[in-house]
Image (cartoon, helix red, strand yellow):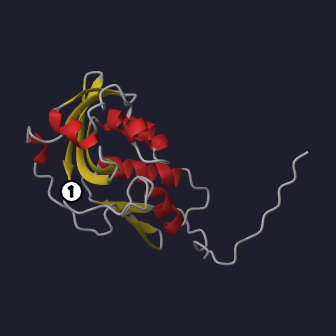
Amino acid sequence: MLVVLFRLADDIESAGPPLPRPTEISTHPSGDAAFRSYAELLLSRMPAPTAEGLALRLRRAYPHALVQATDRRWVILRDGSAVDGPADGWWVDAGLPRVRHDLDGLVLEANPAARQLLGEDIVGQHWQDLATPGAAPRVAEFMAIIERLGTVVSRCRMPSASGALVEFDSFSQVEGSSVVTIMRPLSREAPDTMSA
């Protein structure tokens, strides 16, 4: 027999009462279809959704995410603001880190810039192995989103070869049975307290 006792903590604030399921959501940046798909997936799994609850779940993969709920309209912000940055074709720069991986996340090829960023031994590893603790289960969900959409421009964060967290824009495109992902590291330093 197993007996389990629970005690509610006095120092944790409530996330607030559940809100009516939103009838309209908008996401920013509006061009990040992967972020929108992921937010919709998480929202669909919440039996009693709250804005804070959704934001907390989103921050596992998008550490700056915020959710603003007004009535039945929710605005979901990937980077903490509603400013859409231009999708200026940055991914055509041949000097950026570039990897080819299969739809299960196994890295098949990596250019020298990717090896420098993520480690010399990246080929043969899975994205799940490279992700921060707690984020590995999200990888399969993102692979399914990339496969469904075909091309995804988004933002990610993971440990670099040095062990420090690096935040980067990513461009992923399905090419046959594999995916090419190009990364543009951001200049700002990501806080090391959140997993993504």
| Residue at 11% across, 48% down | 90
Image-based side of 29 in relation to 39, left or right: left
- Going 29% across and 53% down the picture, which residue do you hit? 166
What residue lies at 70% left-to-right and 73% top-to-bottom?
9
User: Is 137 placed left or right of 86 in the picture?
Assistant: right
Residue 16, horizontal then vertical, whole percent: 59, 74
Figure disc tally: 1
Q: Which residue is mark 1?
A: 186
Quadrant containing the N terminus is top right
**Residue 100 drawn above or below residue 132:** above
Quadrant in the rendering for residue 177:
top left
Residue 8, located in which quarter of the rendered image?
bottom right
Q: Is residue 22 visible?
A: no
Residue 20 at x, y = what percent? 55, 66
For the view shown, which residue lies furthest in the front direction? 162
The percent coordinates of residue 57 (x first, y second) are 49, 57
Q: Callout 1: 10 Å neighbours few (<14), some, many (20+)? A: few
Q: In x, y percent, where is residue 71?
A: 47, 73
Say what secondary structure mark 1 lies in: loop
Kindly indicate the quadrant of the structure image that contains residue 7: bottom right
Using the image as rendered, state which of residue 50 and residue 182 is in the foreground: 182
**Residue 139 visible to an observer of this rendering:** yes
Farthest residue to the top: give it. 177
Q: With 32 as the anchor, is 112 left or right in this view?
A: left
Identified at 8% across, 37% down, the residue is 94
Residue 146 versus residue 109: which sits nearer the camera?
A: 109
Front residue of this view, candidates 79 and 149: 79
Q: Establish if 44 lies above or below 190.
A: above
Disc 1 marks which amino acid? Leu
